[in-house]
Image (tube, grey):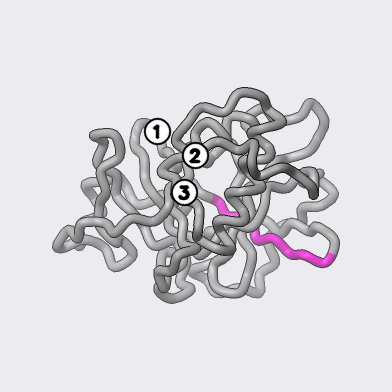
Amino acid sequence: MTDSFDKQRVEPFEKEIGSPATKEEAWEDIFEAGETGTLPFATTDTYLDAYRVQSEDENKKILAFKLGVEEYALDILEVKEILRFQPPTFVPRTKPFVLGVISIRGEVLPILDLKHRMGLGQTKITEKTRILIVERRDERFGLTVDAITSVEDLSRTDIESSPHVRSTQEEGFVEGIGRRGERILILVRVTEVLNFGSAAELEKT
């Protein structure tokens, strides 16, 4: 991504952005919003579209985000939307990692605390908190993250298999370890995060 861009050219996030270059600039503003929480936006389908086509080489494009002090990442193709955090409606008798449900364009989505789901403690909601919308078959779920940090390209040589040094609970959710210079990115296996049956089965047993 370019380090310099003109913020005046970026339209509000609810509007359609025309060229891919402008979408890239919009991504830069999204990351600044992750740091400052000053930009009001609801969804970012339009901006994710610019990154949905993987390159023809062996690179993998990922969305990096914070859970606590560590950086995690998802394959960009698995992220359908990004939402600014909105308080979910609590649903009684659900799993401890379920924060509740929200309504997006008439669709009711369960919101999961990703940090809690991975055994890392509960998320503290701040102005940087975002909800990543992911899909499993025909069901959509929201995953809370502490902040979005960047979009990165990783080659196969940048990715190592998951080391067996993490907690048993967290290990099953880790697909591998990505390296970008001095940065370490923990790649999340979203299929395991969502491996709890149907949305209806989120109720406590």
Q: Quadrant of residue 9?
A: top right
156 displayed left or right of 196? right
Location of mark 2 (residue): 13
| Magenta-span inclusion, residue 185 | yes
Q: Earlier in the sequence, mark 2 or mark 3?
A: 2
Callout 2 amino acid: Phe
Q: CA distance from mark 2 to mark 1?
A: 28 Å
45 displayed left or right of 201? right
Could you say which is closer to the camera, residue 10 or residue 128?
10
Callout 3 amino acid: Leu
| Mark number displayed over residue 132 | 3
Q: Position of residue 174 (x, y in %)?
A: 59, 59
Q: Position of residue 104 (x, y in %)?
A: 30, 39
Q: Which residues are magenta?
A: 182-189
Q: CA distance from mark 2 to mark 3?
A: 16 Å
169 displayed left or right of 182? left
Which quarter of the rendering shows the N terminus?
top right
Q: Position of residue 122 (x, y in %)?
A: 40, 73
What residue sits 79% from the left and 44% below the top? 2
Q: Residue furthest front?
A: 8
Which quarter of the rendering shows the C terminus?
bottom left
Could you say which is closer to the camera, residue 16 or residue 186?
16
Location of mark 1 (residue): 137
Element marked by disc 3: strand
| Magenta-span inclusion, residue 139 | no
